[in-house]
């Protein structure tokens, strides 16, 4: 999949960068989540989105 198309690039970034991570079990959850889907903990954080180039 070529990421030259801006729509495809934005869609890929949405799914790769915008989600919440449970601090207790590490599960990935949607941004709208209030509780973890796996362990039911309310201790969620947003994924760190530091954009760096790969070496």
Image (spheres, rainbow, N blue to C red):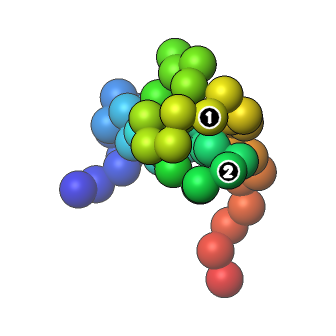
Residue at 71% x, 48% y is: 23
Residue at 68% x, 34% y is: 44
Residue 35 at x, y = what percent?
Answer: 56, 25
Residue under label 2: 24
Q: Secondary structure at mark 1?
A: loop
Residue at 64% x, 74% y is: 54
**Disc assigned to residue 9:** none
Residue 48 at x, y = what percent?
Answer: 74, 46
Residue 4 at x, y = what percent?
Answer: 37, 46
Q: Looking at the image, is mark 2 or mark 1 earlier in the sequence? A: 2
The span from disc 2 to disc 1 (Cα, nearest Å) is 7 Å
Pick whichever, 20 or 1, lies toward us.
20
Pick whichever, 44 or 12, lies toward us.
44
Above or below, 16 against 37 in this view is below
Question: Would residue 24 be seen by someone viewing this image from the given angle?
Answer: yes
User: Does the residue at mark 2 contact the one at mark 1 (Cβ under 8 Å)?
Assistant: yes
Residue under label 1: 41
Residue at 32% x, 37% y is: 8
């Amino acid at each position: 999949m070529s990421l030259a198309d801006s729509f495809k690039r934005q869609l890929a970034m949405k799914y790769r960068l915008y989600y919440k991570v449970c601090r207790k079990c590490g599960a990935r959850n949607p941004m709208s989540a209030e509780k973890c889907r796996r362990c039911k903990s309310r201790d969620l954080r947003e994924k760190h989105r530091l954009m760096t180039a790969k070496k």
